[in-house]
Image: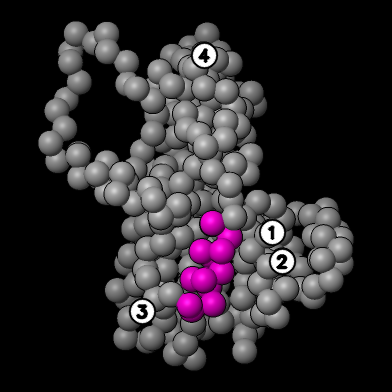
Amino acid sequence: MGHILITGAGSGFGREIALRLAEQGHPVIAAVEIQPQIFALQQAAKKRGVQLSIEKLDITDEGDRAKAWQWDVDILLNNAGISEGGSVVDIPAENLRKQFEVNVMGTILLTQGFAKKMVKSKKGRIVFMSSVAGLTVDPFTGAYSASKHAIEAFAAALDKELKSFGIQIATVNPGPFLTGFNDRMFETWQSWLDDPSTRVFDYKKLAFPHEQFDPEEVITTSITVLTGKTNRYRNLVPAKMQKDTEKQINDIWGKTQNNPKGGEEDSLVKKAYHIKPGTAA
């Protein structure tokens, strides 16, 4: 059996999914972005008494991608990603480009090499760690959300294109989970190389506008998808968010344009000014 490759396994969902799969006896390649994350993950694996192969793989690095394509991989979890917070009108060009360079370009270019090998062997599974943000949009998460909408489009196209070869495609779409990822998204403005006086919004006063869930359900759902215990294409977590998400998607058909007189603040913009970072659901 080929390995399950998990990108972005140095932290968050990826790290725990890799460790948990290894505990269950699956052969895992846990890929981390930078060298220092290797030792930290080695220590975590040792502590848990599990065996896993740990490799350095920066998905935006051409050499790293070429190296990865030599590995024996049957199942790919595209988990690596970054999140850039801020209004569409304020995010500097360099930050916008980096958001897409990692989440879209790096992810898809890495996938191409593995997909071609899977086509030759006529077997394989490619799973994209997408997001509810790939289906709906909140204020101040436009760049991240756009990158995940792009991933949704690429995944849907691949699903159709690779059908005749027996390659399985799936997405995992987490809602707001308390891993620190969402709260850090609302701190990226601190490193912007722009003129703060030109910003429309005051980012010192804003926080991620949702209460956040315990990450356990994302980990168990991802393992279910990776190990083929479900054949669902889209796997939204928590499952209880599905009806609300479907409603948000459908509501757009009846939506009218904003009042030209202004004055009315979006409810989530309002909430971003009042919620405390890291608020648990």
Percent from the top left, x then y, of residue 45? Answer: 81, 66
Say whether disc 1 or disc 3 marks the residue closer to the N-terminus.
1
**Mark 2 to mark 4: distance in Å?**
40 Å
Which residue was labeled with disc 3?
162
At horizontal 54% and vertical 56% (from top left) the residue drawn is 217
Which residue was labeled with disc 2?
19
Percent from the top left, x then y, of residue 184? Answer: 62, 34
Mark 1 or 4: the one toward you: 1
At horizontal 12% and vertical 36% (from top left) the residue drawn is 254
Q: Secondary structure under badge 3?
A: loop
Residue 31 left/right relative to 278? right
| Callouts 1 and 4 close, C-beta under 8 Å | no
Which residue was labeled with disc 1?
15
| Callouts 1 and 2 close, C-beta under 8 Å | yes
| Callouts 1 and 3 close, C-beta under 8 Å | no
Label 3 sits on what residue type?
Leu
